[in-house]
Image (cartoon, rainbow, N blue to C red):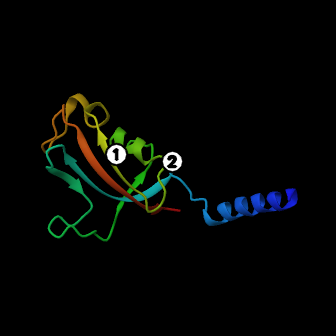
Amino acid sequence: MRIETYLLSMCMILYVSCSMPIQRVVEHGDIIRVHYQMTLLDGTRLDESYNKHAMEVLSQPLRIEVGKGQVIRGWDEALVGMKKGERKSIQIPPDMAYGEMGAPDNILPSDTLLLDIEMMGFVD
């Protein structure tokens, strides 16, 4: 009985580890490609990698080197830990978005942003 229990436990552990492949996660310094849509809290679209009329994905996702300041801080931080194919919706407070300066194109210093991200993959 003891041996059977031990073997059963080993099989269960092996089964779990075999059925859950380890996926690479985004780290600072990785170069990745993402699709995204950024809006204000009221739904006003600010920027996106989708066809603005048909909401279809364009051919080229955005290329980002994570942690290098190529995107706003809240976006940069949200990318860390994502896996290929993962989608994330985040709310970015003003101090992690455009801050006191705001940005041209309708973004005020006090604006909170909504960002939908889809991590498409790593650039090798």
Whole-percent x and y of residue 53?
14, 67
Mark 2 burial class by Cα count in 10 Å: few <14, some 14-19, many 20+: few
Whole-percent x and y of residue 83?
49, 56
Mark 1 burial class by Cα count in 10 Å: few <14, some 14-19, many 20+: some
Left or right, residue 23 beside residue 63: right
Q: Do the residues labelled 2 and 1 touch (CB within 8 Å)?
A: no
Q: Disc 2 versus disc 1: distance between alpha carbons?
A: 13 Å
Task: Name the residue carrying label 1.
Answer: 71
Whole-percent x and y of residue 65?
44, 50
Q: Which of 43 and 70 is in front in this view?
A: 43
**The disc label shown at residue 35, or none:** none
Quadrant position of residue 94? top left
Quadrant position of residue 59? bottom left
Report the residue at 46% width, 62% height from top. 121
Secondary structure under badge 2? loop
Q: Nearer the viewer, residue 66 or 80?
A: 80
Secondary structure under badge 1? loop
Quadrant position of residue 3? bottom right
**The disc label shown at residue 29, or none:** 2
Asked if 123 appears above or below 107 in the picture, the reply is below
Asked if 11 appears above or below 26 in the picture, the reply is below
Asked if 30 appears above or below 111 in the picture, the reply is below
Left or right, residue 64 beside residue 20: left
